[in-house]
Image (cartoon, rainbow, N blue to C red):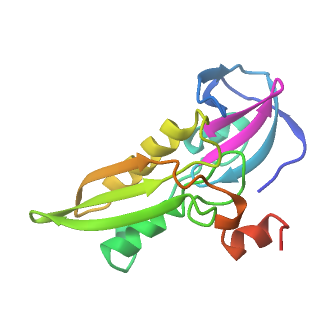
Amino acid sequence: MLKQDTIEVLRECNALLVPSGIQVTIQKGSLVMITQALGNSYTVYVNGNLARVAGKDGDALGMVILHEEDVNELDGTLEDKVWTVLKSCFDPEIPVNIVELGLVYECHVLPQGKDHAVAIKMTLTAAGCGMGPVLVAEIEKKVRDIRGINAVKVELIFDPPWDRSMMSDVAKLQLGML
């Protein structure tokens, strides 16, 4: 979703600057432009910067509050559910999920007692991106919310370094690269 009009923020709300990940407060009355609304967040252009606003604060932008469906209600294996969750995580600067971007290198669902552990190796589009810890925390929380998962480890790796050839054809098509 892309809203081209500048809108006035209706109430104060927290946001994370992109790509640094620094938390800021967008003041009521600030003018913003929504650049994307994907996953469970909005990316806005404000005061010359991009910022990520949590979906729960959509009302501050005059938009709907974004809720994600409960992955536990979906059919499929634990691994299917983990991949569904990963596809709900988006780079705040690129309107493509992290799976289609080719950022997830490995994902293993491993038995651990009566439950399971998940081990994920992933990268970022740029090694110095401050949003890395934000994305990792989002992934860990979403995967941990899946019933039957008791441990999640997301490891950021940069070898091999990410490049555009790692994107799926779906991502390339979505970005006008095919």
Residue at 33% across, 66% down? 108
Is residue 12 shown left or right of residue 99? right
Inspect the magenta stretch and tell me whether residue 16 lies in it: no
Q: Quadrant of residue 22?
A: top right
Q: Nearer the viewer, residue 84 or 132?
A: 132
Inspect the magenta stretch and tell me whether residue 43 lies in it: yes
Is residue 173 shown left or right of residue 58? right
Placement of 162 over or under 41, stated as above or below: below
The N terminus: image quadrant: bottom right
Q: Magenta segment range?
A: 41-53
Q: Residue furthest bottom?
A: 76
Q: Residue furthest left?
A: 113
Residue at 70% across, 74% down? 170
Q: Position of residue 50 (x, y in %)?
A: 74, 34
Placement of 176 over or under 63, stated as above or below: below
Q: Nearer the viewer, residue 29 or 25?
A: 25
Q: Position of residue 49 (x, y in %)?
A: 78, 28
